[in-house]
């Protein structure tokens, strides 16, 4: 059984069919990319999978469990976390505090326990901090822990957002255009980070426009055009697919 199963997913906004009968699966331990031109429905697809939008039809199953009706925080608690196309850090909080937010779904202490300052909450707080710092160390940003998020470079903020997503200890990580706004060196560093994350057992589904990044790190690639899937194959096969060349790359079909 695949870790993620997407079956005949549909979403319409008024007269626009943003996602139309899209089906594909993601096997555990792989990096799978979703590509396509602007307006292809990639981010809408991510929002459907992660619970930020409800589908008009179709289904999403994660670890064999249907996700319809589940809220984003419930999906995160089930083992799927995501980043966003536009960075959503808390600018006045430190980098570490932002990462701690991602750890919330794995903590037990609620509002009342925190207010009562119960002894077991102290231990949990220490563990949450240690695990969050460990994630930051994995991504090479532990030295930035006490820096205010707004003072960080764009690339550093991207990495903090990735650390926040990983803090929940997901089995699957959804990355929405993580290379957007990054320079070549930062993109190369990102590729190494994503590969390192996968090598630690986290399955990755990524939406990305940077084709060099996609082709270098992906095990499989799904191509969307006007909301429909037009290809789902290994990177090299997708690069040579005449339909993809014509529709996605805008070249004449040979």
Image: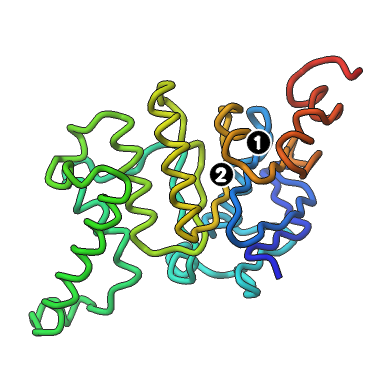
| Residue 44 rendering spot, x and y as whole percentages | 61, 45
Would residue 74 be found to the left or right of residue 147 on screen? right
Mark 1 element type: strand
In the displayed structure, would residue 236 be above or below residue 94?
above
Find residue 35 and name its label. 1
At x 15%, y 79%, the residue is: 121
**Front position in the image: 243 or 197:** 197
Would residue 64 be found to the left or right of residue 157 on screen? right
How packed mark 1 is, by other alpha carbons closer than 10 Å (few <14, some 14-19, many 20 or more), is many
At x 33%, y 72%, the residue is: 106
In the displayed structure, would residue 62 be above or below residue 151?
below
Looking at marks 1 and 2 on the same chain, the residue that comes earlier in the sequence is marked by 1
Task: Give the CA distance from mark 1 to mark 2.
Answer: 9 Å
Count the numbered circles shown: 2
In the displayed structure, would residue 149 be above or below residue 251?
below
Query: Which quadrant, please, contains the N terminus?
Result: bottom right
| Residue 70 rendering spot, x and y as whole percentages | 54, 69
Mark 2 element type: strand
Query: Which quadrant, please, contains the C terminus?
Result: top right
At x 63%, y 33%, the residue is: 215
Find residue 206 and name its label. 2
């Amino acid at each position: 059984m695949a870790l993620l199963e997407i079956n005949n997913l549909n979403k319409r906004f008024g007269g626009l069919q943003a996602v139309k009968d899209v089906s594909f699966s993601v096997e555990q331990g792989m990096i799978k990319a979703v590509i396509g031109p602007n307006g292809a429905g990639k981010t809408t697809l991510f929002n459907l999978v992660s619970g930020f939008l409800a589908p008009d039809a179709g289904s999403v199953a994660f670890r064999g469990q249907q996700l319809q009706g589940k809220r984003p925080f419930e999906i995160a608690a089930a083992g799927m976390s995501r980043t966003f196309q536009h960075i959503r850090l808390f600018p006045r909080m430190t980098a570490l505090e932002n990462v701690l937010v991602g750890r919330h779904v794995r903590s037990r202490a609620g509002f009342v326990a925190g207010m009562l300052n119960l002894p077991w909450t102290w231990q949990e707080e220490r563990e949450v901090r240690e695990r969050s710092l460990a994630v930051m160390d994995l991504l090479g940003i532990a030295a930035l822990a006490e820096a205010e998020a707004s003072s960080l470079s764009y690339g550093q903020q991207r990495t903090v957002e990735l650390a926040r997503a990983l803090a929940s200890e997901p089995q699957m990580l959804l990355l929405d255009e993580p290379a957007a706004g990054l320079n070549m060196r930062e993109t190369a560093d990102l590729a190494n980070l994503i590969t390192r994350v996968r090598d630690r057992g986290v399955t990755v589904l990524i939406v990305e426009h940077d084709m060099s990044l996609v082709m270098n790190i992906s095990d499989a690639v799904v191509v969307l055009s006007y909301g429909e899937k037009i290809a789902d194959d290994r990177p090299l096969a997708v690069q040579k697919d005449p339909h993809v060349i014509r529709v996605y790359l805008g070249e004449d079909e040979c």
